[in-house]
Amino acid sequence: MFGRKKKILLAPVDDSDNGSSQPRLSPRSPSEAIKPSMAPPPPPKLRRRRRGMLSLLSGLLTLLVAVAIAGIFGFSMLQQEVTADGPLQSDKVVVIPRNTGTGEIAQILKQEGVIEQPLLFQAYAYMNRQRGQLKAGEFQFKAGTSVEEAIDTLIQGRAILHTVSVPEGLTSEQVLARLYEHEILTGDVTETPREGSLLPDTYKFERGTTRQQIINTMQAAQRQAIEQIWQRRSPELPIKSPQELVILASIVEKETGRADERTRVAGVFINRLMKRMRLQSDPTIVYGLVGGKGTLGRGILRSEIEAATPYNTYVIEGLPPGPIANPGRAALEAVANPSRTKDLYFVADGSGGHAFAETYEQHQRNVARWRQIEKSRPAPETNDVDRVAPEGEQTSVTPGLRGTANAQPAGGRPGRGFDASEGTEKDPLKNKSFDLTKPKNVPALQQP
């Protein structure tokens, strides 16, 4: 056998020491001869660092995607839970006391059967804090109310509103009695409001409102109404101040309950004031005797008509010193802009209204017609408030006829005249409460 011949490669040898410029070949190993020439690789440390950053970024991106997917899924599940119908089978009113925390509210709603999961309610309530805090009050939750709807109800504050109605013509004491009869109102009133300072109306309020707050609201409403009405009053009025406007309006309020007559009744009193005639109004006699109690509960006696009190307009000249009730807006408007007539008298006509007259002669004919109507009516019951006076006392009138602004011409003594409210629903001697909107009466009043 013949062996392969090996090639011997010569590598250049540096002969710089020999002074020769030609390279000298030297032997090179085969492995060195076949190794190709290439650029040096990057440092291993740099390669590992770059690969680590990419792995970290990739992991974070994956985590964010997973969290987003989980968040979307979780939010979807949360929305499904909070919008699902609740366990409430029928509408229910729930009271949330003041200064109640979110956790306590959740427990109250669970006890009342509005929600099933208090923790879910609390979590969703905290998520909605930017919309507002949960409010206290009395709220109505409908059947099947969801957690979202319950929170929305408490945040938006759609609390149940109660009402209290105060009719026109009540005295301040009678208004307080009405407020104390209302079971929803709380607290006491510090002092009886000044007569005529309350505006009769229907007022809405939430549970927890105090009686003093209602009084404050009524007083503010009355001040605003008087200011507005006083500014647009007729310039010819013999009324010098807003207080006098209220005084006369309270008398008008007691004299007639018909809206179509208020301005004409006010005109009668205005005409009498301008002629310096006494007003001669029965309700002023009653107020002078019993004050804020508002009613005698019996007929007016002759001695009481002639008895001098600061409010008895059969005795005093002009207006009494203060209002005899709390007039409504319509009565205030009627006095501020009364009818332009020459009427000086009016008497009940038997139909709930009044017959007006310019002269005493005309008035007497109206009186005669009214007496015929009275005769045709059944006799009053023995327990009628407007009953015959006790023996030994002479009443100023026969049943149904009492002295008031329709008695005699100026300068005459009070005679057998007639109450303008007589025969109407607001007759002060027949209606103990003057409350025409509800059958409930003011509590029984003691006789003076």
Image (cartoon, rainbow, N blue to C red):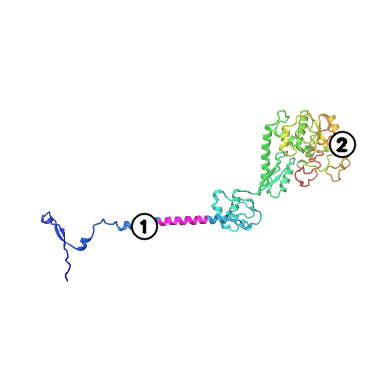
The one of 23 and 296 positioned closer to us in this rendering: 23
- Magenta residue check for 113: no
User: Which quadrant of the figure has residue 421?
Assistant: top right
> Can the viewer see residue 362 in this picture?
yes
Question: Please, is residue 220 above or below residue 5 in the view?
Answer: above
State which quarter of the image contains the C terminus: top right
Left or right: residue 416 versus residue 77 is right
Structural distance between the alpha carbons of marks 2 and 1: 115 Å
> Can the viewer see residue 246 in this picture?
no
The range drawn in magenta is 58-75
Q: Of the residues under marks 2 and 1, which one precedes in the sequence?
A: 1
Question: Please, is residue 276 above or below residue 55 in the view?
Answer: above
- Magenta residue check for 71: yes
Question: Please, is residue 158 above or below residue 415 in the view?
Answer: below
User: Which quadrant of the figure has residue 101?
Assistant: bottom right
Q: Secondary structure at mark 2?
A: helix
Residue type marked 1: Gly
Mark drawn on residue 371 = 2
Q: Secondary structure at mark 1?
A: helix
Mark drawn on residue 428 = none
Give the percent coordinates (x, y) of residue 139: 64, 51
Query: Which residue was labeled with disc 1?
Result: 52
Q: Main secondary structure of the magenta part?
A: helix
Residue type marked 2: Arg
Give the percent coordinates (x, y) of residue 216: 67, 42
